[in-house]
């Protein structure tokens, strides 16, 4: 075998080896079908288990025992008003008049400037279309944190605070009622010369009616739509149970802040 033939054979052998290497690499590096998903673990499973919890529809916890405890302190206690966000969490009483708890502490019965949040004395829970709750606004010089009584309601005048504060619960003796904030606005009062005070509302802004007639409600709704701070997208009519919260406005005796919420959920207590 001459040297030329020998070199040719060596070259062919090298080429065969290179080809085999390339084919082998393609086999081992090529996709071998979809990879199997790792078996799920208990910690990775986020599926909620079915529950028989009667509170499942509402996050607020409540019990008959808690209601009975407050009622034992004061028989005028009717419910606790609690925003889901914690914006407000206060007991509510109902006296024989709307002056009964204006400057009276519900627990001690003693005088206090802040009074107690109270339900309108005319209201009948379970019958009236509109439950009206009053609470004091505490001026900044006395409450720099702006967290006492109904003062925090003013946060709802800013639409940026709506979403996190849109739900408010009434914690009653035998159930929880959830309301969704529908309207927030300032109500203009009329000055009474004889009493030297702002006492009355205009005819189309009567937020304090316990029940609305089919004739008057459209008039009131038009006024609300005109003066509300923003559109929440929540609507209500004469067929809905509503909750009206009222407080004062700092340095404006002629104004009242009104927050209206619509009943959207009710859960009975076991």
Image (cartoon, rainbow, N blue to C red):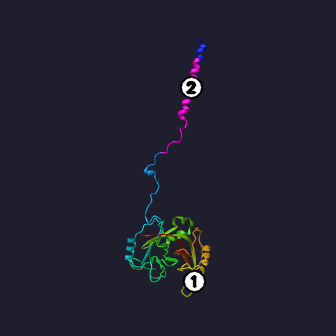
Residue 100 placement (x, y as % from top left): 44, 82
Q: Mark 1 points at which residue?
A: 191
Q: Which of 132 and 50 is in front in this view?
A: 50
Q: Which of 260 and 267 is in front in this view?
A: 267
The residue stretch that appears in magenta: 9-37
| Residue 176 placement, left or right of 12 | left
Q: Which of marks 2 and 1 is in front?
A: 2
**Main SS category, magenta section:** helix
Q: Is mark 2 on a helix, strand or loop?
A: helix
Residue located 57% across and 66% down the image:
159
Label 2 vs label 1: CA separation? 102 Å
Name the image quarter holding residue 24: top right
Residue placed furthest toward the top: 2
Residue 78 placement (x, y as % from top left): 43, 76
Quadrant assignment for the C terminus: bottom left
Dots 2, 1 in contact, CB < 8 A:
no
Q: Tell me if I can see residue 91 in this picture.
A: no
Q: Which mark is residue 18?
A: 2
Based on the picture, tell me whether residue 13 belongs to the magenta stretch: yes
Based on the picture, tell me whether residue 79 belongs to the magenta stretch: no
| Residue 73 placement, left or right of 197 | left
Q: Tell me if I can see residue 190 in this picture.
A: yes
């Amino acid at each position: 075998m001459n040297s030329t033939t020998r070199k040719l054979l060596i070259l062919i052998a090298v080429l065969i080896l290179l080809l085999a290497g390339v084919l082998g690499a393609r086999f081992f590096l090529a996709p071998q079908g979809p990879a199997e998903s790792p078996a799920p673990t208990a910690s990775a499973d986020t599926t909620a288990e079915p529950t028989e919890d009667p509170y499942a529809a509402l996050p607020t916890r409540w019990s008959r025992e808690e209601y009975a405890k407050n009622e034992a302190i004061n028989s005028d206690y009717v419910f606790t008003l609690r925003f889901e966000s914690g914006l407000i969490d206060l007991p509510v009483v109902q006296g024989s008049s709307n002056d009964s708890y204006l400057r009276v502490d519900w627990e001690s019965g003693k005088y206090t400037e802040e009074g107690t949040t109270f339900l309108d004395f005319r209201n009948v829970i379970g019958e009236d279309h509109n439950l009206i709750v009053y609470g004091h606004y505490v001026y900044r010089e006395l409450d720099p944190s702006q967290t006492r009584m109904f003062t925090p309601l003013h946060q709802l005048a800013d639409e940026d605070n709506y979403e996190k504060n849109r739900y408010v619960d009434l914690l009653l003796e035998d159930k929880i009622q959830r309301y969704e904030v529908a309207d927030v606005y300032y109500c203009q009062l009329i000055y009474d010369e004889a009493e030297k005070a702002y006492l009355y509302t205009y005819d189309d802004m009567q937020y304090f009616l316990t029940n609305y007639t089919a004739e008057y409600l459209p008039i009131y709704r038009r006024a609300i739509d005109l003066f509300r701070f923003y559109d929440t997208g929540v609507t209500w009519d004469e067929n809905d149970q509503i909750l009206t919260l009222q407080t004062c406005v700092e340095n404006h005796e002629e104004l009242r802040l009104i927050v209206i919420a619509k009943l959207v959920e009710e859960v009975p207590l076991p």
